[in-house]
């Protein structure tokens, strides 16, 4: 059974990530969080066996619709311009769930910046997962056009991290 503090941590992590839905089941207990649809999240809370969870999960859907509305507004604008721009750009995506780091340490410069030229084997960032630091390579020769993740941000499997104009 999860402790209240652990559930709060899960809520924070899910809120900060791009995950839209999170389900955790263990020994008859079930915790389900969903960002986009507050009604489903509220309905999911009574299903949970953990008695204190509905109190913790209930505040989450209240905050989520506002965050979802903001992200929908942001994505609605670039969608029109993005397809024409993205057609010839290569996306460097995260090969795993983890934390994005632009440099090897907080004191070091970022591996790459917008406008930098990269080779196929150039390291562009690190994704840390379970205390393992994985160097991510550019995969293509070209120029960094845009950095899509922020330092210290939680990233998902397949999430675009960089846009590269191939040479």
Image (cartoon, rainbow, N blue to C red):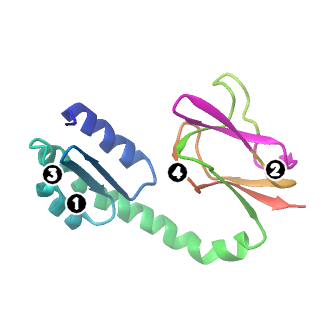
x, y percent for residue 135: 71, 37
x, y percent for residue 14: 37, 47
Cβ atoms at labels 4 and 2 below 8 Å apart = no
According to the picture, the residue beneath numbered tag 4 turns out to be 156
User: Quadrant location of the C terminus?
Assistant: bottom right
According to the picture, the residue beneath numbered tag 1 turns out to be 41
According to the picture, the residue beneath numbered tag 3 turns out to be 48
Q: On screen, 137 above or below 38?
A: above
For the residues labelled 4 and 2, the Cα–Cα distance comes to: 25 Å
For the residues labelled 1 and 4, the Cα–Cα distance comes to: 21 Å
State the extent of the magenta-drawn residues as a range. Answer: 112-136
Residue mark closest to the camera, 2 vs 3: 3
x, y percent for residue 21: 35, 58
* Residue name at image x 54 percent, y 28 percent: 131
Residue 37 lies left or right of residue 43; in this view the side is: right
Give residue 2's mark.
none
Q: In the image shown, does 133 or 72 lie closer to the viewer? A: 133
Mark closest to the chain's N terminus, 4 or 2: 2
Mark closest to the chain's N terminus, 3 or 1: 1
Cβ atoms at labels 4 and 3 below 8 Å apart = no
For the residues labelled 4 and 3, the Cα–Cα distance comes to: 26 Å
For the residues labelled 2 and 1, the Cα–Cα distance comes to: 43 Å
Give residue 115's mark.
2
x, y percent for residue 19: 42, 55
* Residue name at image x 85 percent, y 49 percent: 120
User: Quadrant location of the N terminus?
Assistant: top left
Residue mark closest to the camera, 4 vs 3: 3
Label 4, secondary structure: give it: loop
Task: Answer whether residue 35 is magenta in the image.
Answer: no
Q: Quadrant of residue 126?
A: top right
């Amino acid at each position: 059974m999860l402790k209240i503090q652990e559930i709060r941590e899960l809520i924070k992590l899910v809120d900060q990530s791009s995950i839209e839905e999170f389900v955790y089941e263990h020994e008859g207990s079930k915790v389900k969080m969903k960002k986009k649809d507050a009604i489903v999240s509220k309905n999911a809370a009574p299903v949970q066996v953990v008695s204190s969870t509905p109190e913790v999960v209930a505040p989450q859907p209240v905050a989520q619709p506002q965050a979802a509305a903001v992200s929908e507004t942001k994505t609605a604008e670039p969608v029109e311009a993005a397809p024409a721009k993205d057609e010839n750009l290569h996306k460097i995506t995260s090969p795993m769930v983890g934390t994005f780091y632009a440099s090897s340490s907080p004191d070091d410069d970022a591996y790459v910046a917008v406008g930098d030229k990269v080779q196929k084997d150039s390291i562009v960032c690190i994704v840390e997962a379970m205390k393992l630091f994985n160097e991510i390579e550019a995969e293509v020769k070209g120029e960094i056009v845009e950095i899509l993740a922020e330092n210290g941000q939680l990233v998902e499997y397949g999430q675009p991290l960089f846009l590269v104009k191939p040479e």
